[in-house]
Image (cartoon, rainbow, N blue to C red):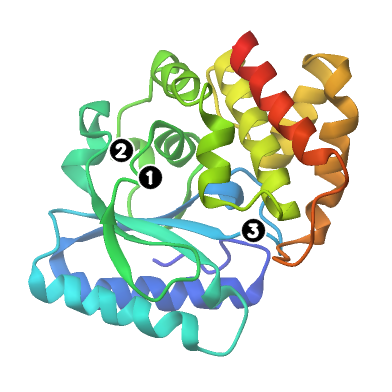
Amino acid sequence: MLNPHPTRYAELNGVLHDLVIGAQDALGESFVGAYLQGSFALGAGDLHSDCDFLVVVRERPDADQEEALRALHRALPHRDGHWNRHLEGSYAVAADLRTTAGLGRDWLYVDHGWDEMRWAEHCNQPWTRWILREHGITLVGPCPVELMDPVPAEVLRAHARAGLDTLADDVLGWCPPTMAWCQRYLVVQAARSLYTVRTGEVASKRDALRWSMVHGDPQWRPLLQQVLADRDCGFDPQAAPRPGSMEAARAFAAHVAAVA
């Protein structure tokens, strides 16, 4: 039975209903289940969030199934409404999802707000798997713990450490440093990485910032408070970073790389 109230937003629940019904129609017997992971699964989803979903399939979609899924996601962002333009997720092959041996394999993926799908490893990462298994919201189908083994803490820590040395360059390589949202994103990613290295778990953006304020070096509290407060500004490509904040964000990322 389809979960009628997976989130506190009635409009989003309607969009998720249409997503699940469309995916079931496209996949037929290959459909296993549909789930929320990401910020909504962690209890932190709000109007500034995207909605991260994962649909589990028995096997890689064939050509007809793939085209039907592409048609579904080609149409969704162009409907009237808000949440239909804020979906992001993948169609995970069940055998890949079962153990960490399947990490990094490409799944059919739709990026936030896009109307074209591609094959990518974006959702096939240790942190997305951990959120799904430990906190995932079932839209329909078996409980996630029946579909996947636990993600070991050492796997989460290793992946969090792996990208820290180049985090600032990686983020600012695709996200312009002249945009305030990018400054906040860099700080959040560094804080979440630090949280995972220290705890072996995954936190929402907001909780990672708060945790870092309490457990991190006090010199970074003003920066973390600024990023937390500015979350309500949302995504505005015309908004410039506060004076000096981008330099502070780079310095914080370098600090996290050094201590983690």
User: Which amino acid, by three-letter code, is at mark 2?
Assistant: Glu
Q: Earlier in the sequence, mark 3 or mark 2?
A: 3
| Vertical placement of residue 33 versus 11, above or below | above
* Marks 1 and 2 in Cβ contact (< 8 Å): yes
Closer to us: 221 or 255: 255
What residue did someone put label 3 on?
A: 49
Q: Position of residue 82 (x, y in %)?
A: 62, 78
> Which residue is depicted at the point 25% across and 52% down?
107
What residue did someone put label 2 on?
A: 146
Closer to us: 33 or 211: 211
> Which residue is depicted at the point 40% across and 58% down?
89
> Dot 2, how many residues are within 10 Å of its Cα: few (below 14), some (14-19), or many (20+)?
few
Is residue 105 left or right of 158 when viewed as pictured? left
What residue did someone put label 1 on?
A: 143
> Dot 3, how many residues are within 10 Å of its Cα: few (below 14), some (14-19), or many (20+)?
some
Q: Position of residue 260 (x, y in %)?
A: 59, 12
Asked whether the viewer can see residue 79, the reply is: yes
Q: CA distance from mark 1 to mark 2?
A: 6 Å
User: Which amino acid, by three-letter code, is at mark 1?
Assistant: Cys
